[in-house]
Amino acid sequence: MKIAKYLILGLAAIVCALVLGRSYTYKFRAQDTILVTGLGETQFTSDLIVWSGTLTAEADNVAAGYAQIEQSKRKVQQYLAAKGLPAEAVVFEFVNTDKQYAPVYNANGNWAGQRFTGYQLRQRFIVESADVEKVETISREISSLIAQGVSIEAYAPDYYYTKLDDVKMGLIEKASADARTRAEKIAQNAGTKIGRVASARMGVFQITGANSNEEFSAGGSFNTSSRQKKARITMRIEYRIK
């Protein structure tokens, strides 16, 4: 029993020594690195615009409603063609039809049900083009169709950039170079030099308006409302010290 007791105490001492040794090694390594965060930013102009609107009509019967939608559709097509926009840049979606009802109240003012008042029809169209300037102008002047009897709901354009992968790669390079510059400055002030990279972690890709106060998102921002954009990315890099 005494021998077993001493064996257990001996094994416990060895385990404690191993744990302490590893802790010391980890602490030494942690102190033997420099951890910095580099930033990469750039501004660019959107090269693709997506603009949409909805044609609406109200009628007592579906056939009359479709006739109104078709008339409005032709006027929109003529308007866009006159502005120099090719027909293939415009897509008209299917027509949605909804029955409309109005509440009915009795003489005492209590709700007594509802009555059918007719149909509402809606057809959405989407314009997608690389001619950002032209479509932007068209979207601002679309209200001129209202004077022609077109019932239309137009929305603000969305702006995109088709070469985001190139932007992202360039920002990673910029952020990495910025991180290395920061690490070298820290090492120089400490009288040492940086060595190889121990670890690297890329931050979230953020796209905001170029001159806006948009907040960054933990999941990444992706601005589509601004034609002029700013992209930002960070690189968290840990360097060994020589």
Image (cartoon, helix red, strand yellow):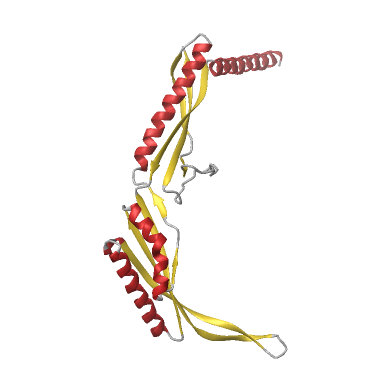
Q: Nearer the viewer, residue 85 or 162?
A: 85
* Residue drawn at (32%, 73%) of the image: 74
Q: From what the image shows, is residue 23 above or below residue 86?
A: above
User: Is residue 200 visible in the rendered structure shown here?
Assistant: yes
* Residue drawn at (64%, 17%) of the image: 16
Numbered circles on residues, count: 0
* Residue drawn at (36%, 81%) of the image: 67
Residue extending farthest right: 108
Q: Quadrant of residue 77?
A: bottom left
Q: Nearer the viewer, residue 99 or 5?
A: 99
Q: Nearer the viewer, residue 37 or 210?
A: 210
Residue extending farthest top: 191
Give how far across and how far down residue 137 sits, in percent.
37, 57
Q: From what the image shows, is residue 210 above or below residue 182?
A: below
Q: From what the image shows, is residue 149 above or below residue 133?
A: below
Q: From what the image shows, is residue 187 above or below residue 171?
A: above
Give how far across and how far down residue 81 sits, in percent.
28, 65
* Residue drawn at (52%, 12%) of the image: 189
Give how far across and how far down residue 162 sits, in percent.
34, 46
Q: Quadrant of the N terminus?
A: top right
User: Is residue 198 visible in the rendered structure shown here?
Assistant: no
Give how far across and how far down residue 119 sits, in percent.
47, 81
Q: Quadrant of residue 63?
A: bottom left
Q: Is residue 10 left or right of residue 240?
A: right
Q: Is residue 64 left or right of residue 18?
A: left
